[in-house]
Image: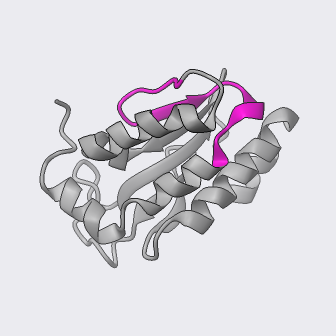
Amino acid sequence: MDYNAPTVADYLNQLPVERQEPMRRLYETIRASLPTGFGQTMSYNMLSFVVPKSIYPPGYHVKTEEPLLFLSLASQKNFIALYHMGLYGSKELFSWFQEEYPKHSKRKLDMGKSCIRFKYMDDIPYQLIAELCTKITVEAYIQIYESGRLRPS
């Protein structure tokens, strides 16, 4: 869905009523759990967390004027999507998440390389998402990014 909102509050307020509380809770969970150094912005019409250009001046390799994207949250047509580039860049983290997910949710994990899809608003594993957010520091993510591990395998 294209909400094209300039601020986080605008984005959340434009969501369908049934999505507002889960999206707010996910956003707050992520914001409270990410290590120090990550910034937040609206990027690609999503709620995004980035490595600020003040920390990583080269920015995103495709659009160097933009900060390095780390994590985004979006309300899609049929699900809430959490895009976590650390999962894409770290096989160890990806495996950990796949192993932990069934311990926190009664639903089957619906996931791509970096995208976790939540179709059921009553079964979002907030505690697991909080733990996932603590797993990579800004410095560690820059190392993963620069090592080239973010290239599709």
Quarter of the image for the C terminus: give it: top left
Question: In this rendering, would 39 be left or right of 92?
Answer: right
Quarter of the image for the N terminus: give it: top right
| Quadrant in the picture for residue 41 | bottom right
- Residue 11 visible at all: no
Q: Residue at x 46, y 27 (%)?
A: 111
| Quadrant in the picture for residue 104 | top right
Residue at the left extreme? 147
Near-viewer residue (53 or 73): 73
Up the image or down, 105 lies above or below 5; here it is above
Near-viewer residue (44 or 114): 114
- Residue 113 visible at all: yes
Question: In this rendering, would 4 be left or right of 56?
Answer: right
Looking at the picture, how far across and down is residue 32, in whole percent? 61, 67
Q: Residue at x 19, y 62 (%)?
A: 143
Residue at the right extreme? 17
Looking at the picture, how far across and down is residue 108, in whole percent? 56, 21
Q: Residue at x 56, y 48 (%)?
A: 128
**Magenta run includes residue 6:** no
Q: Residue at x 46, y 71 (%)?
A: 35
Near-viewer residue (120 or 21): 120
| Quadrant in the picture for residue 58 | bottom left
Up the image or down, 83 lies above or below 35; here it is above
Up the image or down, 38 lies above or below 69; here it is below
**Magenta run includes residue 122:** yes
- Magenta residues, as a range? 109-126
